[in-house]
Image: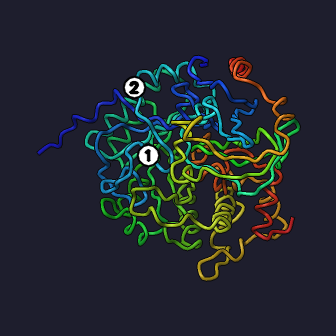
Amino acid sequence: MGVSEYEVRDGIYYTREHDWIKVEGELARVGITDYAQNKLGDVVYIELPAVGKTIKQVLEPKSRDMEIGAVESVKAVSTIYSPVSGTIKELNTTLQERPEIINSSPYDEGWICIITPTNLQEELKNLIGPGEYSEYIKTL
Amino acid sequence: MEESNQNNSATSVRVAFGTGVVLGLWHGQLLESPTTAHLLTYYEGRCRGNCRFCPQARESAADLKMLSRVAWPKFELEKVAVALNGNSNGFQRVCVQAVNFPGSMDAVCEIVSRVKDSCKLPVTVACPPPSIDDLNRLVDIGVERVGVALDAANEEIFAKVKGDFYSWAGHLKALEDAKTVFGDKVSTHLIVGLGEHEEDMVRIIQKLHDQAITIGLFAFTPVQGTPLSRQSTPEVVSYRRIQLARFLIVNNLGNANRMVFEEGRIKNFGIGEEELAKVAESGEPFITSGCPGCNRPFYNESPRGPIYNYPRKLKRNDIEEITAALSLNT
């Protein structure tokens, strides 16, 4: 599914903070959306969390324990929020050497981390699907 | 033999990334918007100068679209002019910066003329040391302010960092010439962290202020591909002391001759502790300095910080952090 110039992938869930999550068995792979990378511009740095860090699903009001890390362009920094609660299991450390992969491949090679979720099925209900995300970004 | 100036046409111009976002030339996210529209002459080759920190330098291996840590993509001058005509409200000034190449002043004048046709913003030209004729030409086409970047705090550092092509005496003369033509509308840049002591920087700030030259303070920024790419940025607290000293001097609240230095470092600012704390508490000394209306967001630093030059009014927690680092009583 695509919306004008922004790719919106089927089969994954989204947050209104422009993060995506793909369920892979009992794990969840996380990244930022094509819309997010496009608005940010050239990514020059990514702040990754530590493996083992506990994080909470992003809800309002936001708090620091919902933050996975941050992605930075030359002139801006965007916080990466966690779509689900859990523990950071694995990081895409390639991004530390080549942060630009987030721009070129936000849904594939540009994945950011893998989470072991603690309440996945319940928390998926708080996320939105590709159709609703597509409509959401049209309003921005 | 006259040098070829075939590349001096200003049909193209480089536009600073943030400027391009505000003008609607391309997409991008900005934590802080620039208040000056920054343009740079476009040239297919490298600068004749060889300043060791500069990506444009003759012997630099850096990407030619870089100036400091910022990308300045090439764009059609006509489209930039149209965009300025429609989107100049967010800006307080236009700054046209010049690389040193054969015919660069012609390119500068062409850019300035298109800018002046497009909007009513005051225009600064920041260029290599201009001749009196060039200065008069700039006045005639409506340039409001001219800048010649001294960069170094003293002759010794100038020779090391810029001396391959320029001279300290030549730059000082250019600033004097600029003053005879532009009066008090003359600016310069000083870069902290090129190897000087704080005292060196404070004394040159005093000297330039006494000549009514406006000072834009910069923190040295290592850029990949330049000879100084591995040099560290200045210590933040040292930069803060220099910012504070600059503010006191240019606002005639202090003088370098009344400051006390110890091994080159500012030990005492030469004013009462209470007054000093009040000045620091205002946050004003730590905001970007230079031409009126120029905030240069993240020109010297990552938006993650630490921020050397705040492109906006400081928040309470910024001020508290700075005054604590400076050990000022508040």
Q: List x then y, in percent, for residue B154.
A: 46, 69
Q: Chain of mark 1?
A: B
Residue positioned most to the front: A25
Q: CA distance from mark 1 to mark 2?
A: 17 Å
| Residue B21 lies in quadrant | top right
- For the point 46% across and 36% down, which residue is it? B39
Residue B147: % across, % down: 47, 47
Evaluate whether label 1 is on the same chain as label 2.
Answer: yes
- Identify whether B330 is placed above or below B285: below
Which of the pair B318/B216 is nearer the observer?
B318
**Mark 2 crowd level (few <14, some 14–19, many ≥20, 10 Å Cα):** some
The numbered disc on residue B66 is 1
The answer for which chain carries disc 2 is B
**Residue A138 or residue B313, whichever sits in front:** A138
Q: Quadrant of the image for the C terminus of chain A?
A: top right
Q: Please state if B60 lies on the left or on the right of B301 as rendered.
A: left
Question: Residue tagged by mark 2?
Answer: B76
Residue shown at the point (72%, 61%) measured from the top left: B253
Q: Secondary structure at mark 2?
A: strand
Q: Quadrant of residue A20?
A: top right
User: Mark 1 Cα within 10 Å, few/some/many (few <14, many 20+)?
Assistant: some
Expressed as whole percent of the image width and height from the top left, the position of residue B280 reads: 77, 60
Using the image as rendered, state which of residue B291 and residue A27 is in the foreground: A27
- Mark 1 secondary-structure assignment: strand
Q: Is residue A40 above or below residue A69?
A: above
Q: The N terminus of chain A lies in which quarter of the figure? A: top right
Q: Is residue B70 left or right of residue A115?
A: left
- Say if B289 sits above or below A12 in the image: below
- Residue type highlighted by circle 1: Met
In which image quadrant can residue B249 be found? Answer: bottom right
Q: Amino acid at mark 2?
A: Glu
Choose the circle earlier in sequence order: 1 or 2: 1
